[in-house]
Structures are given as C-alpha cells and as structure tokens.
Amino acid sequence: MKKKSLALALLLVVSVVMSACSNYQFKPTTSYEISDFTATDHRGEEVSLESLKGEPWLAMFIFTNCTTICSPMTYNMSLIQEDLVKKGIEDYKIVAFSVDPANDSPEVLSEYLNRFNVPDESKWHLVTGYDQKFIEQLAVGSFKSLVKAIEGEDQVMHANTFYLVDEKGVAVKNYTGYSQTEDGVPYDTIAVDLQSLIEERLGK
C-alpha cells in the first residue's frame, strides 16, 4: 500500500513539473530596439536588420584576433545550437558582430568559424563590412553595451553577453555568454526562451 502511495506521489510530482514546463511563458527583461544596419557575413552575403526580421535571433560581439573570451563564447553558442537542434527548432538565426572590422574580412571570419564544430552553419552570420565607429555606436545605441578599440593594441573591449532579439528586431533579453564556472552560462534557458518566442510567433 505504501509503495502504491509513493508511486502515485511521484507521478503527481512529475505531472506538475511537466505541466509547468509546457506552460512556460517567456518574459522579456529588456526592450532595446536595434538600429538599422547593413553588413556582409562570412559567406559574402548581405545581412541587414530587415533581412533578419520575421525570426528571432541570438547576437554576440566577437573578433578573430581575440585572445580572451571570443573563442569560448563562440563555442558556448555552438552548444546552445546543439540544444536547439535536439529540440528540432529551426526558425532562428545567430549573428556575431565583428568588433574588429578592419581585420575581419568575410574570408577571415569564415576561417574562424571553421574552427568550431557548429551543428548548423547555415544559421550563422558572422558579420563585418562597416567601420569601427559604426560598430561601437551600434553596440552602445542598440545593445546598451560597450565596444572600444584599445589604442596601440590589436585587442578590442566588448561584453561577454549573448542577446536574444525578437522577430521585430527588439533585444528582449540578455545572458552571460562566458563564465569560468560550469553553471555560469544558461544554455538551457536560452534555448527554451528562443523556443518560446518562436512558438508565440507561430501561435502555438
């Protein structure tokens, strides 16, 4: 009798947890409208704010000569994409803005991305084709984030942040994209938030 009661209690707990997961509703924590931009991605194709509209996208700032956080951030983004692939999620993009456009040509960005075993390269846009002043202003004005070239050095200061942008071009949430602790980057939360935005757009 006790075993049956315990089994029923466990079943009830599982049901409640599953119900809570299925009823999860994404709640935005920011509302940053992204300014219009036109850039060139690592495949040599034009990417603009307008071309990205209609689907949510994940954004970050990186550069190929980075000696600190850029490679770990790119790797972490690839892990997030692995989760998205497992969930069967397809209606999204990943946009990585180069903060060193003078050195990061499309070819250089393509070589950089090839270092990572990304699950679906077609979703990625590593973009360049603008000047340093533009990317610094875009970061501050649209993402409320600092990007600053270090005078006399080949390094550029930028945040270790991932941004979730909705289908209208509004940054609605941000997350830690790099951490020295295993649980610092919220991989699952990012994937679930992105999935929730897609489902809301589709009316599911």
Image: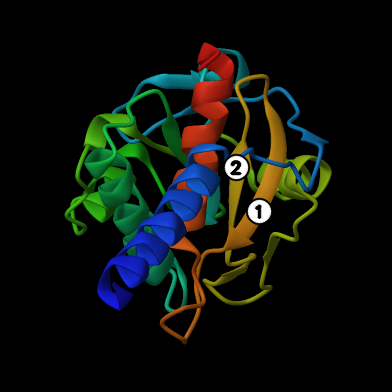
The N terminus lies in quadrant: bottom left
Task: Identify whether 2 is placed above or below 131.
Answer: below
- Find residue 24 and report its image quarter: top right
Amino acid type indicated by mark 2: Leu
SS under mark 1: strand
| Residue at horizontal 63 percent and vertical 76 percent from the top | 152
From the top left corner, tell me how far across and down residue 44 is, in percent.
33, 26
Task: Identify whether 94 is placed above or below 53.
Answer: below
Task: Identify whether 31 is placed above or below 132.
Answer: above
The earlier-in-sequence mark between 2 and 1 is 2
- Name the residue tied to disc 2: 164
Q: Residue 155 carries which label?
A: none
SS under mark 2: strand
- Name the residue tied to disc 1: 174
Is the Cβ of the residue at disc 2 closer than 8 Å to that at disc 1?
yes
Q: Which of 180 and 109 is in front in this view?
A: 180
